Image: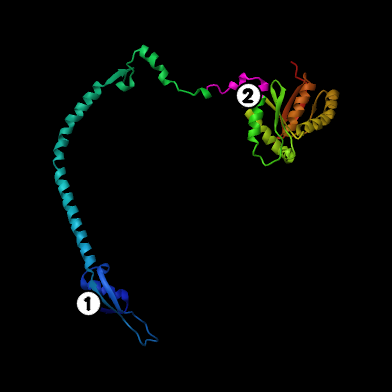
Amino acid sequence: MIKIESTTLEGAYQDAASSLECSVTQLKIEVVQYPSSGFLGLFKKSAIIVAVIDSDIDSESKKEEELTEIKVKEKSKAKTYSKPQKQKKQDKPTVKSEIKKELEQSHTILNDTIMPQSFVSTQDEEDEEDDITSYLADYDDEFDNLDGEDLKSTGEIAKVVQTDINKLFSSICFEIDKIDVSVYDENTLLIEFKGEDAALLIGKEGYRYKALSYMIFNWINTKYQLQLRLEIAEFLKNQEESVSRYLSSVKESVDRDGRAQTKVLDGVLVQIALRELREIYPDKYVAIRSTRDGLKYIIINDYHSN
């Protein structure tokens, strides 16, 4: 045990470690007096400590030293054991030559190229025909006939769609009646939404109507190969009436000049107008055209004759 005095505690710790010839972490220190700068140079105090080597830490350091010595000895033994292996390396060329011989014997020449036997088929054709079923996937019967709905009549499909679409909209927040699905013609299903809040499904400028129409059409057309006529709170009926009133002036232009062009029409309106104009003028060229901004309109003209 030694007593150290210094201006700072750090200096006292370092002096104690150097005096005892150990590190600061191995010291057991008791502070007798903490340093103080005093007031205006008066009453200044230095740091005083009593230090001794901690026996527990010292024993641990000795154990660590012993472990390192053991590890060094084990490494040296491992090196001595590894020396005989050098003699085995001299025998490797003979082993490599034997492996090469085996590989050469196990290869087959096919189309002037050397290939392992595992890549060359040696089975008879009869065996290949017997085992060909092992390469076929085993599908469930449930999914073998995805288009099995085509076997049903349009009326039966309408009943299935009505059940499915009512399940789909059963949790909707709008107050609507039971959705009716009926046969509009042999290739088209009529789906009608009615009820107190049915008009809310149309949305501003029909954006909800367009979304629902797109969604339901892709379902019905993909699964049943049928067309869709979607009626929500008589929205489609009102649109058809407004388009018919507008097309009266277009018809006059066609009758007078033999050709005409509609104004820019919305997605729903352009399809309604196209269908009606093609019914009125089956012998004329009626088609949809687009502006640079992607807006749609319809032109009516005569077919070019050669």
Quarter of the image that includes the C terminus: top right
Q: Nearer the viewer, residue 24 or 228?
A: 228
Residue 145's disc is: none
Task: Please tell me whether residue 112 is drawn above or below residue 218 in the rendered image.
Answer: above
Estimate the x, y position of residue 272 in percent, counting from the top left: 75, 29
Residue occupying image coordinates x 35% and y 87%: 43
Give above or below for 177 relative to 280: below
Q: Nearer the viewer, residue 263 or 53?
A: 53
Question: x%, y% of residue 176?
Answer: 71, 37
**Secondary structure of the residue carrying numbered label 2:** helix
State the residue at coordinates (85%, 29%).
Answer: 249
Spatial CA distance of label 1 from label 2 is 99 Å
- Identify the residue at image location x=63%, y=24%: 224
Q: Residues within 10 Å of mark 1 (few under 14, many from 20)?
A: few
Q: Which residue is mark 2?
A: 224
Magenta residues, as a range?
A: 144-157
The answer to whether one can see residue 184 in this image is yes
Tag 1–tag 2 contact (CB < 8 Å): no
Q: Is residue 125 above or below residue 7?
A: above
Q: Quadrant of residue 91?
A: top left
- The residue under label 1 is 2
Tell me which amino acid carries mark 1. Ile
Viewer-nearest of labels 1 and 2?
2
